[in-house]
Image (tube, rainbow, N blue to C red):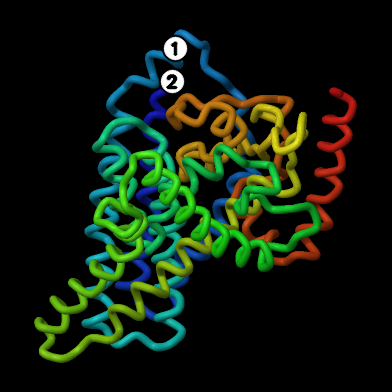
Amino acid sequence: MSALKRIGFFTAFIIPALVVLGFYLGGAWNYLTVFFVFFLIPLADFLIGEDPENMEEREARVIAEKFYYRLITYIWAIFQLFFICWGFWVISTSALSILAWIGFVVSFALVTGGIGITVAHELGHKKSTIERFYSRLILMTVSYMHFYIEHNKGHHVYVATPRDPATSRKGEHFYAFWLRSVVGGYRSAWKLERARLERKGKAFWSIGNEMIWYTVLPVLFCALLTAVVSLWQSVFMWQVPLFFFVQSFLAFSLLEIVNYIEHYGIVRKEISPGKYERVNPMHSWNSNHRLSNFFLFQLQRHSDHHANAIKRYQVLKHYEESPQLPSGYPAMIMMASIPPLWFKWMNPKLREWEEAVYQAG
Protein backbone atom coordinates (compact mmCIF):
# COMPACT_ATOMS: atom_id res chain seq x y z
CA MET A 1 0.00 0.00 0.00
CA SER A 2 1.31 3.43 -0.93
CA ALA A 3 2.34 6.01 1.66
CA LEU A 4 -0.50 8.24 0.43
CA LYS A 5 -3.07 5.59 1.25
CA ARG A 6 -1.52 4.87 4.63
CA ILE A 7 -1.74 8.53 5.59
CA GLY A 8 -5.10 8.97 3.87
CA PHE A 9 -7.09 7.24 6.60
CA PHE A 10 -6.09 10.00 9.03
CA THR A 11 -8.18 12.40 6.92
CA ALA A 12 -11.13 11.38 9.11
CA PHE A 13 -9.72 13.66 11.80
CA ILE A 14 -10.26 16.66 9.53
CA ILE A 15 -13.99 16.50 10.29
CA PRO A 16 -13.74 17.10 14.07
CA ALA A 17 -11.02 19.70 13.48
CA LEU A 18 -13.49 21.64 11.34
CA VAL A 19 -16.14 21.38 14.07
CA VAL A 20 -13.72 22.90 16.58
CA LEU A 21 -12.62 25.58 14.10
CA GLY A 22 -16.21 26.44 13.23
CA PHE A 23 -17.14 26.80 16.88
CA TYR A 24 -14.29 29.17 17.71
CA LEU A 25 -14.90 31.25 14.59
CA GLY A 26 -18.51 31.51 15.76
CA GLY A 27 -21.90 32.17 14.21
CA ALA A 28 -22.50 30.74 10.74
CA TRP A 29 -19.05 29.16 10.80
CA ASN A 30 -20.63 26.37 12.85
CA TYR A 31 -21.92 25.11 9.48
CA LEU A 32 -18.37 24.82 8.09
CA THR A 33 -18.32 21.03 8.64
CA VAL A 34 -21.70 20.60 6.94
CA PHE A 35 -20.43 22.53 3.92
CA PHE A 36 -17.23 20.49 3.82
CA VAL A 37 -18.97 17.10 4.06
CA PHE A 38 -21.90 17.73 1.74
CA PHE A 39 -20.33 20.05 -0.82
CA LEU A 40 -16.54 19.86 -0.89
CA ILE A 41 -16.21 16.09 -0.46
CA PRO A 42 -18.76 15.28 -3.22
CA LEU A 43 -17.05 17.82 -5.47
CA ALA A 44 -13.66 16.22 -4.73
CA ASP A 45 -15.12 12.76 -5.35
CA PHE A 46 -16.28 13.96 -8.76
CA LEU A 47 -12.94 15.59 -9.64
CA ILE A 48 -10.60 12.95 -8.19
CA GLY A 49 -12.70 9.99 -9.28
CA GLU A 50 -12.65 6.36 -8.27
CA ASP A 51 -10.00 3.94 -7.06
CA PRO A 52 -10.80 0.41 -8.29
CA GLU A 53 -7.31 -0.91 -7.46
CA ASN A 54 -7.05 -4.13 -5.46
CA MET A 55 -4.02 -5.54 -3.65
CA GLU A 56 -2.55 -8.87 -4.53
CA GLU A 57 -3.58 -11.56 -2.05
CA ARG A 58 -0.08 -11.92 -0.61
CA GLU A 59 0.21 -8.18 0.04
CA ALA A 60 -3.31 -8.07 1.50
CA ARG A 61 -2.46 -10.77 4.04
CA VAL A 62 0.53 -8.73 5.22
CA ILE A 63 -1.29 -5.37 5.29
CA ALA A 64 -4.24 -6.91 7.16
CA GLU A 65 -1.94 -7.70 10.11
CA LYS A 66 -0.28 -4.27 10.31
CA PHE A 67 -0.93 -2.73 13.74
CA TYR A 68 -0.77 0.76 12.23
CA TYR A 69 -4.28 0.46 10.77
CA ARG A 70 -5.75 -0.82 14.02
CA LEU A 71 -3.99 1.99 15.90
CA ILE A 72 -5.88 4.61 13.87
CA THR A 73 -9.20 3.13 15.00
CA TYR A 74 -8.02 2.86 18.62
CA ILE A 75 -7.00 6.52 18.58
CA TRP A 76 -10.41 7.44 17.22
CA ALA A 77 -12.25 5.52 19.95
CA ILE A 78 -10.40 7.38 22.73
CA PHE A 79 -10.66 10.64 20.82
CA GLN A 80 -14.44 10.36 20.48
CA LEU A 81 -14.86 10.01 24.23
CA PHE A 82 -12.87 13.21 24.82
CA PHE A 83 -14.58 14.93 21.91
CA ILE A 84 -18.05 14.41 23.37
CA CYS A 85 -16.83 15.68 26.75
CA TRP A 86 -15.59 18.80 24.93
CA GLY A 87 -19.06 19.12 23.38
CA PHE A 88 -20.61 19.06 26.85
CA TRP A 89 -18.22 21.79 27.95
CA VAL A 90 -19.08 23.93 24.90
CA ILE A 91 -22.81 23.59 25.44
CA SER A 92 -22.58 24.37 29.15
CA THR A 93 -20.30 27.42 28.87
CA SER A 94 -21.31 29.10 25.59
CA ALA A 95 -24.32 31.22 24.69
CA LEU A 96 -25.01 29.98 21.16
CA SER A 97 -27.82 31.38 19.07
CA ILE A 98 -30.45 28.89 17.87
CA LEU A 99 -28.96 28.79 14.37
CA ALA A 100 -25.42 28.41 15.69
CA TRP A 101 -26.57 25.67 18.10
CA ILE A 102 -28.20 23.74 15.25
CA GLY A 103 -25.09 24.08 13.10
CA PHE A 104 -22.86 22.95 15.96
CA VAL A 105 -24.97 19.90 16.84
CA VAL A 106 -25.42 18.78 13.23
CA SER A 107 -21.68 19.17 12.64
CA PHE A 108 -20.96 17.32 15.86
CA ALA A 109 -23.13 14.40 14.76
CA LEU A 110 -21.20 14.18 11.50
CA VAL A 111 -18.22 13.32 13.70
CA THR A 112 -19.84 10.99 16.23
CA GLY A 113 -22.15 9.34 13.71
CA GLY A 114 -20.53 9.76 10.32
CA ILE A 115 -17.03 8.78 11.41
CA GLY A 116 -17.54 7.40 14.92
CA ILE A 117 -20.15 4.78 14.12
CA THR A 118 -18.12 3.79 11.05
CA VAL A 119 -15.17 3.05 13.33
CA ALA A 120 -17.43 1.26 15.84
CA HIS A 121 -18.78 -0.84 12.98
CA GLU A 122 -15.24 -1.80 11.92
CA LEU A 123 -14.15 -2.67 15.45
CA GLY A 124 -17.34 -4.54 16.32
CA HIS A 125 -16.65 -7.16 13.66
CA LYS A 126 -13.28 -8.12 15.10
CA LYS A 127 -12.47 -10.91 17.56
CA SER A 128 -10.16 -9.13 20.00
CA THR A 129 -11.58 -7.99 23.32
CA ILE A 130 -10.07 -4.51 23.08
CA GLU A 131 -11.56 -3.84 19.65
CA ARG A 132 -15.00 -4.95 20.75
CA PHE A 133 -14.71 -2.82 23.88
CA TYR A 134 -13.83 0.24 21.82
CA SER A 135 -16.76 -0.47 19.50
CA ARG A 136 -19.21 -0.45 22.41
CA LEU A 137 -17.55 2.62 23.93
CA ILE A 138 -18.16 4.61 20.75
CA LEU A 139 -21.73 3.34 20.42
CA MET A 140 -22.43 4.41 24.00
CA THR A 141 -21.64 8.01 23.05
CA VAL A 142 -24.43 7.95 20.43
CA SER A 143 -27.02 5.94 22.41
CA TYR A 144 -26.99 3.07 19.91
CA MET A 145 -25.27 0.21 21.71
CA HIS A 146 -27.80 -2.40 20.57
CA PHE A 147 -26.29 -1.99 17.09
CA TYR A 148 -23.39 -4.12 18.33
CA ILE A 149 -25.75 -7.10 18.68
CA GLU A 150 -28.21 -6.48 15.88
CA HIS A 151 -25.65 -5.64 13.20
CA ASN A 152 -23.40 -8.63 13.77
CA LYS A 153 -25.95 -11.32 14.65
CA GLY A 154 -28.97 -9.99 12.78
CA HIS A 155 -28.14 -7.77 9.82
CA HIS A 156 -25.20 -9.81 8.54
CA VAL A 157 -27.23 -13.00 8.74
CA TYR A 158 -30.46 -11.73 7.18
CA VAL A 159 -29.23 -8.91 4.90
CA ALA A 160 -31.13 -8.65 1.60
CA THR A 161 -34.05 -10.69 2.94
CA PRO A 162 -37.46 -9.63 4.34
CA ARG A 163 -36.27 -10.56 7.85
CA ASP A 164 -33.70 -7.75 7.95
CA PRO A 165 -35.05 -4.39 9.13
CA ALA A 166 -31.83 -2.70 7.96
CA THR A 167 -32.35 -3.69 4.32
CA SER A 168 -34.27 -0.97 2.49
CA ARG A 169 -36.90 -2.16 0.03
CA LYS A 170 -37.50 -1.19 -3.56
CA GLY A 171 -39.75 1.87 -3.70
CA GLU A 172 -39.38 2.55 0.05
CA HIS A 173 -38.32 6.10 0.85
CA PHE A 174 -35.78 6.79 3.56
CA TYR A 175 -38.20 8.20 6.14
CA ALA A 176 -40.36 5.06 6.11
CA PHE A 177 -37.22 2.95 6.23
CA TRP A 178 -35.83 4.95 9.17
CA LEU A 179 -38.81 4.10 11.36
CA ARG A 180 -38.83 0.44 10.35
CA SER A 181 -35.09 0.03 10.82
CA VAL A 182 -34.75 1.91 14.12
CA VAL A 183 -37.71 0.18 15.79
CA GLY A 184 -37.16 -3.17 14.11
CA GLY A 185 -33.43 -3.19 14.83
CA TYR A 186 -33.98 -2.49 18.53
CA ARG A 187 -36.60 -5.23 18.80
CA SER A 188 -34.38 -7.65 16.92
CA ALA A 189 -31.49 -6.99 19.31
CA TRP A 190 -33.70 -7.93 22.29
CA LYS A 191 -34.81 -11.15 20.54
CA LEU A 192 -31.24 -12.07 19.69
CA GLU A 193 -30.12 -11.45 23.26
CA ARG A 194 -33.02 -13.50 24.64
CA ALA A 195 -32.00 -16.39 22.36
CA ARG A 196 -28.37 -16.12 23.50
CA LEU A 197 -29.34 -16.22 27.17
CA GLU A 198 -31.64 -19.19 26.61
CA ARG A 199 -28.85 -21.13 24.91
CA LYS A 200 -26.62 -20.45 27.91
CA GLY A 201 -29.38 -21.32 30.39
CA LYS A 202 -29.34 -17.84 31.91
CA ALA A 203 -32.26 -15.77 33.16
CA PHE A 204 -33.51 -13.03 30.84
CA TRP A 205 -33.87 -10.41 33.57
CA SER A 206 -30.35 -10.55 34.95
CA ILE A 207 -27.10 -8.61 34.92
CA GLY A 208 -25.95 -10.98 32.18
CA ASN A 209 -28.47 -9.48 29.77
CA GLU A 210 -26.35 -7.23 27.57
CA MET A 211 -29.36 -5.39 26.17
CA ILE A 212 -30.25 -4.09 29.62
CA TRP A 213 -26.74 -2.66 29.93
CA TYR A 214 -26.76 -1.30 26.38
CA THR A 215 -30.02 0.51 27.05
CA VAL A 216 -29.00 1.92 30.42
CA LEU A 217 -25.33 2.80 29.91
CA PRO A 218 -25.83 5.81 27.57
CA VAL A 219 -28.34 7.25 30.04
CA LEU A 220 -25.96 6.71 32.95
CA PHE A 221 -23.09 8.23 30.96
CA CYS A 222 -25.16 11.31 30.18
CA ALA A 223 -26.45 11.56 33.76
CA LEU A 224 -22.92 11.37 35.17
CA LEU A 225 -21.54 14.09 32.93
CA THR A 226 -24.64 16.23 33.47
CA ALA A 227 -24.09 15.95 37.23
CA VAL A 228 -20.40 16.86 36.89
CA VAL A 229 -21.12 19.88 34.71
CA SER A 230 -24.05 20.97 36.91
CA LEU A 231 -21.93 20.82 40.07
CA TRP A 232 -19.20 22.77 38.29
CA GLN A 233 -21.66 25.46 37.18
CA SER A 234 -23.67 25.34 40.44
CA VAL A 235 -26.90 25.01 38.45
CA PHE A 236 -28.69 22.12 36.74
CA MET A 237 -27.44 22.13 33.13
CA TRP A 238 -30.44 20.78 31.20
CA GLN A 239 -28.61 21.80 28.02
CA VAL A 240 -26.22 18.85 28.43
CA PRO A 241 -28.77 16.00 28.15
CA LEU A 242 -30.60 17.90 25.40
CA PHE A 243 -27.37 18.17 23.42
CA PHE A 244 -26.39 14.55 24.11
CA PHE A 245 -29.64 13.01 22.95
CA VAL A 246 -30.10 15.32 19.96
CA GLN A 247 -26.60 14.56 18.66
CA SER A 248 -27.26 10.85 19.34
CA PHE A 249 -30.49 11.01 17.32
CA LEU A 250 -28.73 12.72 14.42
CA ALA A 251 -25.74 10.34 14.64
CA PHE A 252 -27.74 7.12 14.47
CA SER A 253 -30.03 8.64 11.83
CA LEU A 254 -26.89 9.17 9.76
CA LEU A 255 -26.08 5.50 10.26
CA GLU A 256 -29.58 4.55 9.11
CA ILE A 257 -29.45 6.65 5.95
CA VAL A 258 -26.16 4.92 5.12
CA ASN A 259 -27.86 1.56 5.71
CA TYR A 260 -30.60 2.70 3.37
CA ILE A 261 -28.06 3.56 0.66
CA GLU A 262 -26.00 0.41 1.05
CA HIS A 263 -28.83 -2.07 0.55
CA TYR A 264 -31.60 -0.29 -1.32
CA GLY A 265 -33.77 -2.83 -3.15
CA ILE A 266 -31.19 -5.64 -3.08
CA VAL A 267 -32.67 -9.10 -2.44
CA ARG A 268 -31.14 -12.55 -2.21
CA LYS A 269 -32.74 -15.51 -3.97
CA GLU A 270 -34.86 -17.75 -1.76
CA ILE A 271 -33.61 -21.24 -2.56
CA SER A 272 -36.13 -22.96 -0.26
CA PRO A 273 -38.76 -21.67 2.20
CA GLY A 274 -36.94 -19.38 4.64
CA LYS A 275 -33.50 -20.20 3.21
CA TYR A 276 -31.59 -17.81 0.98
CA GLU A 277 -28.51 -17.98 -1.21
CA ARG A 278 -25.23 -17.14 0.47
CA VAL A 279 -24.29 -13.46 0.63
CA ASN A 280 -21.93 -12.47 -2.16
CA PRO A 281 -20.55 -9.19 -3.58
CA MET A 282 -23.72 -8.69 -5.65
CA HIS A 283 -25.77 -8.12 -2.49
CA SER A 284 -24.66 -4.60 -1.50
CA TRP A 285 -24.21 -1.30 -3.31
CA ASN A 286 -20.57 -0.39 -3.74
CA SER A 287 -18.63 2.84 -4.22
CA ASN A 288 -14.94 3.30 -4.99
CA HIS A 289 -14.80 7.08 -4.80
CA ARG A 290 -11.33 7.69 -3.49
CA LEU A 291 -11.64 10.63 -1.11
CA SER A 292 -14.87 9.68 0.68
CA ASN A 293 -13.48 6.16 1.12
CA PHE A 294 -10.54 7.60 3.05
CA PHE A 295 -12.88 9.50 5.39
CA LEU A 296 -15.06 6.40 5.91
CA PHE A 297 -12.34 3.75 6.31
CA GLN A 298 -13.40 2.15 3.00
CA LEU A 299 -16.90 1.43 4.30
CA GLN A 300 -18.08 2.21 0.78
CA ARG A 301 -16.46 -1.02 -0.41
CA HIS A 302 -19.47 -2.54 1.22
CA SER A 303 -19.91 -5.44 -1.16
CA ASP A 304 -16.68 -7.08 -0.01
CA HIS A 305 -17.47 -6.27 3.61
CA HIS A 306 -20.72 -8.24 3.48
CA ALA A 307 -19.15 -11.11 1.60
CA ASN A 308 -16.22 -11.18 4.08
CA ALA A 309 -17.41 -9.47 7.27
CA ILE A 310 -14.29 -10.02 9.34
CA LYS A 311 -11.93 -8.55 6.71
CA ARG A 312 -10.17 -5.38 7.86
CA TYR A 313 -11.00 -2.07 6.25
CA GLN A 314 -7.57 -1.47 4.70
CA VAL A 315 -7.75 -4.60 2.50
CA LEU A 316 -11.36 -4.52 1.31
CA LYS A 317 -11.61 -5.26 -2.42
CA HIS A 318 -13.46 -3.80 -5.35
CA TYR A 319 -15.68 -6.20 -7.29
CA GLU A 320 -16.52 -5.12 -10.80
CA GLU A 321 -19.71 -7.18 -10.78
CA SER A 322 -21.08 -5.44 -7.66
CA PRO A 323 -23.81 -2.82 -8.17
CA GLN A 324 -22.11 0.57 -8.21
CA LEU A 325 -23.36 3.81 -6.68
CA PRO A 326 -23.04 6.94 -8.83
CA SER A 327 -21.11 8.79 -6.10
CA GLY A 328 -19.71 8.47 -2.60
CA TYR A 329 -21.86 8.42 0.52
CA PRO A 330 -21.94 12.20 1.20
CA ALA A 331 -23.61 12.91 -2.16
CA MET A 332 -25.81 9.82 -1.85
CA ILE A 333 -27.01 10.92 1.60
CA MET A 334 -28.25 14.20 0.15
CA MET A 335 -29.93 12.31 -2.67
CA ALA A 336 -31.60 9.80 -0.31
CA SER A 337 -33.02 12.63 1.79
CA ILE A 338 -35.07 13.74 -1.24
CA PRO A 339 -37.10 10.62 -2.21
CA PRO A 340 -38.19 11.69 -5.73
CA LEU A 341 -34.56 12.45 -6.64
CA TRP A 342 -33.40 9.16 -5.12
CA PHE A 343 -35.95 7.09 -7.02
CA LYS A 344 -35.16 8.89 -10.27
CA TRP A 345 -31.45 8.03 -10.00
CA MET A 346 -31.49 4.68 -8.23
CA ASN A 347 -34.51 2.79 -9.57
CA PRO A 348 -32.99 2.52 -13.08
CA LYS A 349 -29.75 1.28 -11.54
CA LEU A 350 -31.70 -1.22 -9.45
CA ARG A 351 -33.41 -2.50 -12.61
CA GLU A 352 -29.96 -3.00 -14.16
CA TRP A 353 -28.95 -5.04 -11.12
CA GLU A 354 -32.15 -7.12 -11.33
CA GLU A 355 -31.52 -7.84 -15.01
CA ALA A 356 -27.91 -8.82 -14.32
CA VAL A 357 -29.00 -11.21 -11.56
CA TYR A 358 -31.73 -12.68 -13.76
CA GLN A 359 -29.32 -13.27 -16.62
CA ALA A 360 -26.81 -14.89 -14.26
CA GLY A 361 -29.50 -17.42 -13.42
- Position of the C terminus, as image quadrant, is top right
Q: Where is residue 234 in the image (x, y as percent from the top left)?
A: 10, 89
Residue 330 location, quadrant: bottom right
Residue drawn 31% across and 32% down? Answer: 70
Q: Where is residue 318 in the image (x, y as percent from the top left)?
A: 61, 26
Residue that mark 1 sits on: 59
Which element is circle 2 on?
A: loop
Residue 98 location, quadrant: bottom left
Left of 50 or right of it: where is 96? left
Left of 155 or right of it: where is 349? right
Q: Position of residue 212 (x, y in %)?
A: 33, 60
Answer yes or no: is residue 99 visible: yes
Residue that mark 2 sits on: 1
Q: Relative to the observer, which residue lies in front, 285 or 275?
A: 275
Residue drawn 57% across and 34% down? Answer: 301
Q: Residues within 10 Å of mark 1 (few under 14, many from 20)?
A: few
User: Circles 2 and 1: CB distance less than 8 Å?
Assistant: yes
Q: Distance between the residues labelled 2 and 1?
A: 8 Å
For marks 2 and 1, give the one nearer the viewer: 1
Q: Where is residue 163 in the image (x, y as percent from the top left)?
A: 65, 48
